[in-house]
Amino acid sequence: QVTLRESGPALLKPTQTLTLTCTFSGFSLTTSGMCVSWIRQPPGKALEWLARIDWDDDKYYSTSLKTRLTISKDTSKNQVVLTMTNMDPVDTGTYYCARMSGSGWFTWFDSWGQGTLVTVSS
Amino acid sequence: QSVLTQPPSVSGAPGQRVTIPCTGSSSNIGAGYDVHWYQQLPGTAPKLLIFGVRNRPSGVPDRFSGSKSGTSASLAITGLQAEDEADYYCQSYDSTLSGWVFGGGTKLTVL
């Protein structure tokens, strides 16, 4: 059974750096083809893909946010970490990590964490 | 403004059939990239509903089906039930943005 769980701060001040951890089980990021993404959802708004990391350490970032994002993995701990710098109130929302299935660009998010709400406010 | 366009809301009576369109462009759906669909019940994380245009994960009822034509895709739900009331999102890959993209979401109301 695949499970993912996000953890991190619930409240941040503007300009601070957000660090989120996704701890997963039921699969390994050392397995060929495996990948994990981060997706966020502002309150009452649509989903937005942020970043992806692959089993071979390939990394992909949202074009609009790439200067602020860093994704990494710790395979020994079954964890994926996302950092986002210079947080702003518009970054408030629920952040999800999700496992991806498929191949190359033909991939989808087949298992999701429960999400963690991050609020940015002074 | 989402790269994939969905109507903000659709509605139908129990037992009826509804469709949710997802309109893209030549850099995503029209380029041949697959479309996937997610159901998000109130207060919960999204759940995979359809992958690879028309495939259902284990456990998803066959009342849900997907299709694709040209630069658009569609999710159809037959035999509407009260439990289907949720937000639905389409998703694909966009070659111009070099990333995975979602539609703006459609809220389904069961009357």
Image (cartoon, rainbow, N blue to C red):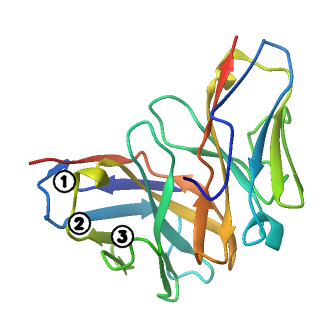
Residue B38: image location, x then y, percent: 65, 45
What residue does disc 2 label? A19
Say whether marks 3 and 1 touch (CB < 8 Å): no
- Kindly identify which chain the residue marked by label 3 belongs to: A
**Residue situated in front as seen by the camera: B23 or B57:** B23
Q: Which residue is mark 1?
A: A9
Q: Quadrant of the C terminus of chain B?
A: top right
Instruction: Give the residue at the far left of this rendering.
Output: A122
Which of the 4 image quarters holds residue B84?
top right
Type of amino acid under label 2: Thr
Sequence order check: which comes first, mark 3 or mark 2? 2
**What is the spatial separation of the Cα atoms under label 3 and label 1, in whole angstroms?**
16 Å
In the image: residue B29, left or right of residue A56: right
Of B4 and A8, the residue lying toward us: B4
Q: Nearer the viewer, mark 3 or mark 2?
A: 2
Distance of mark 3 from mark 2, alpha carbons?
A: 13 Å
Residue shown at the point (82%, 67%) measured from the top left: B30
Q: Nearer the viewer, residue A45 or A117?
A: A45
Label 3 vs 1, first from the N-terminus: 1
> Which is more foreground, mark 3 or mark 1?
1
Residue count near mark 1 (Cα–Cα under 10 Å), binned few <14, some 14–19, many ≥20:
few
Residue A113 image position (x, y, % from top left): 45, 51
Helix, strand, or loop for circle 3? strand
| Residue of label 3 | A79
Q: Residue at x 53, y 67 (%)?
A: A27
